[in-house]
Image (cartoon, helix red, strand yellow):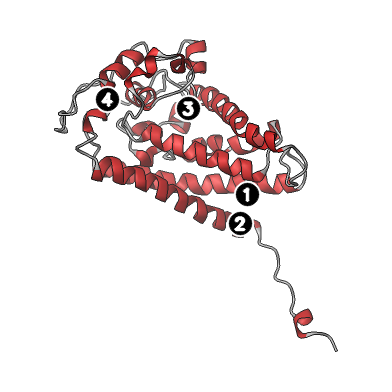
Amino acid sequence: MVPLLARVPKPPPPSFLDRVLESSWELAVRYALLAGVAWLFCYVIFRRRWFHRKIIAKFPQSKEVRREIFYSAISVVVFSVVGVATYYAAKAGWTRMYFGKDAYKTVWFWCSIPCAAVIHDTWFYWTHRLMHHPKLFRVFHRTHHLSHNPTPWAAYAFDPPEAVIQACMFPVVVLTIPMHPYAFALFMIWQILFNIAGHTGYEFNPRWLMRTPLKWVLNTPTNHIMHHETLRGNYGLYFNFWDRLMGTNHAQYEARYHEVTTRRRSMQDPVAVPPVGCNRNLPDQGA
């Protein structure tokens, strides 16, 4: 007699659409939790206490926040489609992603994460700078720059074509270096945390940072918020070396950083302070 359990047919493997829906849900929840916590701390609980570190000394309108959330939701779906496609390519052996524990030593597992960050930062700098070309800006990058005074919800607020460009970071990394899925997952947590922090609108780094060699390496929220203000320069993501090497750091970046990090804690009234080099009129073309 055939055992009863042997007669039960195995469920079919999940389809591409099933995996995209699952991935979209997981990414949306993670993004909502992380960006939501940043929003709660920066714009609700410590709104007044931290105001002296608000880079642009006023708060955005509610409609701007709703727009950021809407476009972030679209980007989440785009990221999931590209991510699932990359997973299928990896399982087919078309990338350098490895799944076995013994394929590479443990030291490479951990080294692959900062290597991925360098690759992503390079990809981001050059694609970001390219999207500011006048012929590409409106198609790829205009929506992100509608946020002159961004919030944590702006981290993924992209036009769909730009979301595709940003998502291509997934295959670029695993086509370049061997990487375990768990290492890639840790890298993705790093990238979303850094991205959200850079869009909070607050400078969290210490005032002495610009007096150390770290200023040549690490990027800061001030650097990226100035990019949103002026639409020019400051194209990097995690690191500042590409901007310094290519001469695209905003000329007043370090002065603005000093101004933000030396404000008095008593500065608590959310009044508009004219930002350095701010340009409120969104041009038809990128810079």
Real-space Cα separation, disc 2 to disc 1, in angstroms: 7 Å
Amino acid on which disc 2 is placed: Arg
Real-space Cα separation, disc 2 to disc 3, in angstroms: 29 Å
Number of the label disc, if any, that sits on residue 19: 2
Q: Nearer the viewer, mark 2 or mark 3?
A: 3
Q: Residue at x 45, y 27 (%)?
A: 137
SS state under label 4 = loop
Amino acid on which disc 1 is placed: Val
Q: Residue at x 37, y 31 (%)?
A: 145
**For mark 3, does the 10 Å Cα neighbourhood hold few (<14), some (14 to 19), or many (20 or more) residues?**
many
Q: In the figure, residue 251 lies in which quadrant?
A: top left
Number of the label disc, if any, that sits on residue 237: 3
Residue 143 visible to the viewer: no
Real-space Cα separation, disc 1 to disc 3, in angstroms: 24 Å
Number of the label disc, if any, that sits on residue 84: 1
> Sequence order check: which comes first, mark 1 or mark 4?
1
Real-space Cα separation, disc 4 to disc 3, in angstroms: 23 Å
Picture coordinates of residue 24 (x, y %)? 52, 53
Amino acid on which disc 3 is placed: Leu
Q: Nearer the viewer, mark 1 or mark 3?
A: 3
Residue 42 visible to the viewer: yes
